[in-house]
Amino acid sequence: MTDWSPSSWTTKPIKQDVVYEDTKGVQDALEKLQKLPPLVTTQEINNLKASLRDVALGKAFVLQGGDCAELFDYCNQDMIEAKVKLLLQMSLVLIWGANKPVIRIARIAGQFAKPRSSPTEVVNGVEMPSFRGDNINGFEADAASRQPDPSRLVSAYFHSAATLNYLRASLSSGLADLHSPLDWGLGHVITPSIKEQYSKIVSAVKDALRFMRTVGIDKDRGVTTADIFTSHEGLSLEYEQTLTRLLRNPIERKHTGAAAQQPTSGFYATSAHFLWIGDRTRQLDGAHVEFFRGIANPIGIKIGPSMVADDLVRLLDVVNPTKEVGKVTLISRYGAGKIAQYLPGHIAAVQASGHIPVWQCDPMHGNTQATPSGVKTRHFTDILAELRQALEIHRAAGSFLGGMHLELTGEAVTECVGGAAGLTEDGLGERYTTFCDPRLNEKQALELAFLVAGFYRE
Ligand code: PEP
Ligand code: MN
């Protein structure tokens, strides 16, 4: 790879940069991080990459979801469990609907940094630096807390580690055991019709398991646990750089089968299994693209209406010159009213280039709007409409919609309008707790999974 190193991004123009006053503090934080162990392993990253290859080829589906902005306070048992259970439930519904394996990637254990449209914002009539995410500054609306604090970078690592630890421990202790999917718990606010549909799927799964036990084939690991991979936007490059390590691929050392095709070593970003570049930081000659082109992980790129088709192909050529299938996930986020205008052209350009990415639909970020009183929200009907169009446009183009990327939470929040429970704009104030974009609540998220599963069963 030409002239790449984990720090070569520092020679390129950067967007969304954070300016610290405490430069000694930054140096200390980065030195500390550099010594800490990877949060995830190359083997796990390679496993995800292999799964995403299947998704790109239409053989599997990927469900990615979690908070827009994770806070350090979300690192607690209840919130982690609620999110994991919701992703497991949704994936079970999608497996049943699409009849394909579902790869689960959570926006968790590191989704702290947020790109902002303006460096300052007005809170209670006072202008102050914008909240950039818990790893950068504090949400509390005063000048001192909004000052970038480098010790938050180290704190981000430890909160990620604690979240990941509980996630791994829960899964290995049977949280995802298919013998008891009803124990994954449906929230008390779930509507009777969703509960009934979900129970039907669970009965079908139980029947299948009974059969497997009878014929003696229920010992498979896939029955008793599930993989949940972690992801976040790779926005804070100083942080990502310290956790990017030149690592040998442990599978290769054995020189077995498919693994022999993998490189013998590579630079792995070990803060998460999957990182993506946001819509605001994907400039071809910019720092983020420079950093991403050198890492061995599977990566995402957000693409919206401002993406020019030729530039999209150039971008793929830069980050994936060998055209590895499924290495790049294109996360499209145009909006329900714009997807028909942009997606067909983007698909055609990519098809003509010979790249085979995962195509994932993010039906959230192009559908954000403000209520007359200024509350940021998204309408369930727009979210569903963008997903439905994505599926149809891909089908018509001989391409695959490989997955969906959602902002959701296991909590009963009131941030998006609509869904079977009929949440209205007037009801948004009840439990509006997001620190950035509005998320689907557990009921809306599960309902969406059923509706998308239904698209596949039509
Ligand atoms: C996000 O995923 O929270 C986000 C900021 O998305 P985008 O880069 O697509 O605007
Ligand atoms: Mn968001």
Image: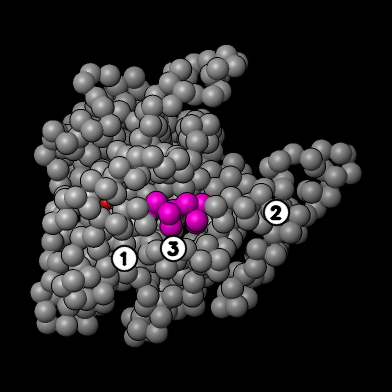
Cβ of mark 1 under 8 Å from ligand 2: the answer is yes
Q: Main secondary structure of the magenta part?
A: helix
The answer for how far apart the CA atoms under marks 2 and 3 are is 23 Å
Q: Residue at x 15, y 47 (%)?
A: 15
The answer for how far apart the CA atoms under marks 1 and 2 are is 32 Å
Q: Is residue 237 left or right of residue 42?
A: left
SS class, disc 1: loop
The disc label shown at residue 408, or none: 3
Position of residue 210 measured from the top left corner of the image (x, y, whole percent): 84, 50
| Cβ–Cβ under 8 Å for marks 1 and 2 | no
Q: Residue beneath label 2, please?
A: 174
SS class, disc 2: loop
SS class, disc 3: loop
Ligand 1 found in image quarter: bottom left
Which mark's residue is nearer the viewer, 2 or 3? 2
The disc label shown at residue 425, or none: none
Residue 450 seen by the camera: no
Q: Is residue 301 left or right of residue 201?
A: left
Position of residue 105 measured from the top left corner of the image (x, y, whole percent): 48, 48
The quadrant of the image that shows the N terminus is top left
Q: Residue beneath label 1, please?
A: 437
Q: Residues within 10 Å of mark 3 (few under 14, many from 20)?
A: many
Which mark's residue is nearer the viewer, 1 or 2? 2
Task: Tell me which numbered mark, 1 or 3, is placed earlier along the sequence.
Answer: 3
What range of the chain is rendered magenta?
Answer: 156-164
Q: Residue at x 49, y 75 (%)?
A: 412
Q: Residues within 10 Å of mark 2 (few under 14, many from 20)?
A: some
Q: Which residue is the extreme one toward the right?
A: 214
